[in-house]
Image (cartoon, rainbow, N blue to C red):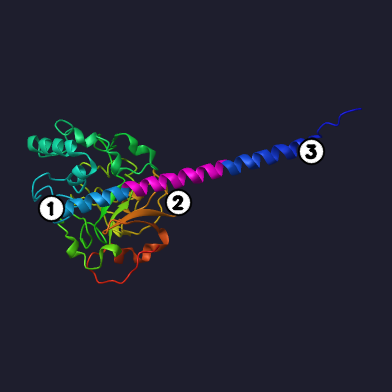
Amino acid sequence: MRRRGFTLIELLVVIAIIAILIGLTLAAVQRVRAAAARADCQNRLRQLGLALHQHHDTQNALPPGHRSLFTATGGMPLSGWPIPVLPFLEQQSLQTQAAEAYRKQNFPFFPTPHPGLSTVVPAFLCPADPRVTSAQEAQKTKTLAAFTSFLGVAGSDAVSNRAGVLFQGSTTRFADITDGLSGTLMLGERPPSADFQFGWWYAGTGQLLTGSADLVLGVREPNLQPIVSGSTCGPGNYPFRPAGGFADPCGMFHFWSPHPGGANFALADGAVRFLRYDANAIMPALASRAGGESAAVPE
């Protein structure tokens, strides 16, 4: 009795079905990985929110979002909120090292005596960004720097409208946040700039030496970089919107994340929320600590 084999059409159908199943499986795996990275990112942001709360409990105020080069109270110019919270992230030795380095050299961009400049601190990083797992060389200054994926929310902007919780010279107390801790943004996601010049965790100048786009950021941050004919990023105030990936040079001016659809934010009460980009219209109200606006955080 002769055995019947597969016809060419049957074989092609089987191959097509297998290809579809592989595609579906890969898509499912990618979704699971993306969900896991987003959850890990939220956990790290929650840890930072808790660290800021512990700082407030011990110092009766949140740390400055950024310290001025010229008028920094307590020293450590051009550093910001990350160094003061290190003891609450089980990084007391790194905080001590930073304080000692500043005593030796008040300008923080010398790797000697400032090794913290290129020291990677996982708590400040979102694992969905593979670039930040190691220190990178900034394209303009050739500085080897480590990063933070999370910036303090300064208000509408970090230069002129510092109505938020963390900005240059801020000493915000929870009592100052009269709009309510559960309705006010404190930290948000923004990956380091494409050229690695903005987003250093240890210290940074920011735009016009304000920390803008470096350690703090507003939800309507202006582009204050030199703009000439042919500049990729124009002037104006940048809204909460997706960026064109890690290579987008304009992504440094607004909150965004590599997670599809939105970005993670820590509220002043320590809760973490994933805000979709369609929340852009209410972001100025959420970024204000005492504006009296009535805007609920989207669930």
**Of 48 and 232, the residue lying toward us:** 48
Tell me where residue 6 appears, x and y as whole percent: 81, 33
Badge 2 crowding class, 10 Å Cα cut-off, few under 14, some 14 to 19, many 20 or more, is: few
- Residue at 78% across / 38% down in the picture? 10
Q: Amino acid at mark 3?
A: Ile
Q: Which residue is mark 3?
A: 9
- Residue at 36% across / 46% down in the picture? 41
Badge 1 crowding class, 10 Å Cα cut-off, few under 14, some 14 to 19, many 20 or more, is: few
- Residue at 43% across / 45% down in the picture? 36
Q: Which residue is mark 2?
A: 260
- Residue at 35% across / 64% down in the picture? 297
Q: Which mark is residue 59?
A: 1
Instruction: Give the side of residue 102 with respect to residue 215, left or right.
Output: left
Q: Amino acid at mark 2?
A: Pro
Asked if disc 2 and disc 3 are in contact, CB closer than 8 Å, the reply is no
Q: Is residue 252 above or below residue 239?
A: above
Task: Kindly report the distance in space between the C-alpha atoms of the residues bearing marks 3 and 1.
Answer: 75 Å
Tell me where residue 110 appears, x and y as whole percent: 16, 34
Instruction: Give the side of residue 147 with respect to residue 111, left or right.
Output: right
User: Which quarter of the rendered picture does the C terminus lie within?
Assistant: bottom left
Label 2 SS: loop
- Is 166 contained in the magenta span? no
Lower position in the chain sequence, tag 2 or tag 3: 3
